[in-house]
Image: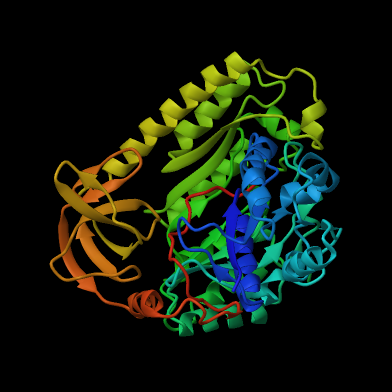
Amino acid sequence: MRTYEVRTYGCQMNVHDSERLSGLLEDAGYARAATGERPDVVVFNTCAVRENADNKLYGNLGHLAPVKAEHPGMQIAVGGCLAQKDRDTITRKAPYVDVVFGTHNIGSLPVLLERARVQQEAQVEILESLDVFPSTLPTKRESAYAAWVSVSVGCNNTCTFCIVPALRGKEKDRRPGEILAEIEALVAEGVSEVTLLGQNVNAYGVEFGDRQAFSKLLRACGEIEGLERVRFTSPHPAEFTDDVIDAMAETPNVMPSLHMPLQSGSDRLLREMRRSYRSAKYLGILERVRERIPHAAITTDIIVGFPGETEEDFLETMRVVRESRFASAFTFQYSKRPGTPAADLPDQVPADVVKDRYGRLVDLVNEIAWEENKTVVGRTVELMVAEGEGRKDSETQRLSGRAPDNRLVHFAVPEEPVRPGDMVTVEVTYAAPHHLVADRVLSVRRTRSGDAWEARTAAPASAGVGLGMPTVGVPAPLPDAPACR
């Protein structure tokens, strides 16, 4: 049996795509390589958005070249956004790569690997539009208790700093019944938390002409018995409507957390970015969310140093950050992305200026996050236990979990054994900028998700690959990563 390893870069969409790639390979008879074992197939699922994405890819490919030379049967495949963009460059720079495939045809990977092996030559297959909606593909989910569920792929926006629409295509929406059927199947397998995933998730429904489709979907999730937590990422402020806020507030299993990219607080720069909202609209959305959901934790993405950014523009961003009171923020120093309109804009900001502004922004974000976390001290919260050993402070070992608002909490090890996916109720006793600590565990609730995790860790690694179903594998927590936007 040939073994494989999938290496993932980028956003949640890529993470979920990698689950599908793993499912496809296992459905074709491959097995995941054990830790430390040399795999027969290495698949790179790439990102074209993050800084130095191409350098990271070619650096990793370079490290594999001598390994492959020593093991002629080994194969290397490159897929994802960078493959979609640089299809011809990859095989030219790394001629030992066997397969290059794009974002629209991940389902072709097993066939392309076999064809490359038989024909003894590289296979490059890049489709320009989606052939099959990826959620119909076999999926090897990384978590027994939490799952990504795609509601759409692609994006209809034209942000000048973003190359995603060119690589993922126009928005394609799934029908609500398909999404709900997938969630119900996941819950039947023990999943208790789902994250609805889309490049522009709250624009869901645009393809079939229902402007309230996303709020209806949230409410429908509230009717699924056994589904304890619903999250979604990432919404766009331009399409964020009051019916979505109402659905969040009125649907008990929709969690009080919201990740909504700001990108800049300067109206002038938002215009240059082609972000179809202004700071007042953004702040108005936050105000209405907090009116309806007082304990909501709001997080965001911010870019520093966009071309033409002045000190006044930057100070506007700092103002909006102060008013927004984010629980955390993913902050980025702008860097050129070939193929985007912003790459050719004049007045690129000097690197030392970008670095200085970035440092000031991070200091402010951390200061506010710490202040916001301190307001949670003394509060009783129910956590979903996460995988891993948690955190050790001095001689105190703690486990980790996520609060309903998605804050990370390290909690004292309870007397009663707990498993990932179980629920613990704790009292928060300490706040740091990026996490909370709970030294008092008030109760433990064992769950079907914990049962599913336990069964998975004891089950044979070949079981359970199916259409969108959780399957056996090495469990891993859902990542804290922003969307591409």
Residue 209 makes an appearance in the image:
no
Q: Quadrant of the C terminus?
A: top right
Of 19 and 223, nearer the camera is 19
Locate residue 472 relative to residue 100 in the image: left or right.
Answer: left
Measured as percent of width and height from the top left, residue 290 is found at 44, 51
The residue sitting at the front extreme is 70
Q: Nearer the viewer, residue 47 or 480?
A: 47
Q: Name the quarter where the N terminus is drawn.
A: bottom right
Residue 145 vs residue 80: left or right? Answer: left
Colour setting: rainbow
Q: Residue 94 sits in which quadrant?
A: top right
Q: How many marks?
A: 0
Q: Residue 333, image x and y in percent?
A: 59, 29
For the point 62% across and 62% down, which residue is it? 40
Say whether residue 380 is visible: yes
Q: Nearer the viewer, residue 12 or 215?
A: 12
Figure quadrant of residue 77: bottom right
Considering only vertical position in the picture, is 183 above or below 172?
below
Q: Quadrant of residue 106?
A: bottom right
Residue at image point 18% right, 69% down: 443
On screen, residue 117 versus residue 9, left or right, reads right
In this view, 440 is above or below 188: above
Can you say whether 27 is above or below 240 in the image?
below
x 25%, y 74%: residue: 445
**Which residue sits at x=85%, y=46%?**
88
Q: Position of residue 34 (x, y in %)?
A: 47, 63
**Image spot of residue 130 (x, y percent):** 81, 65
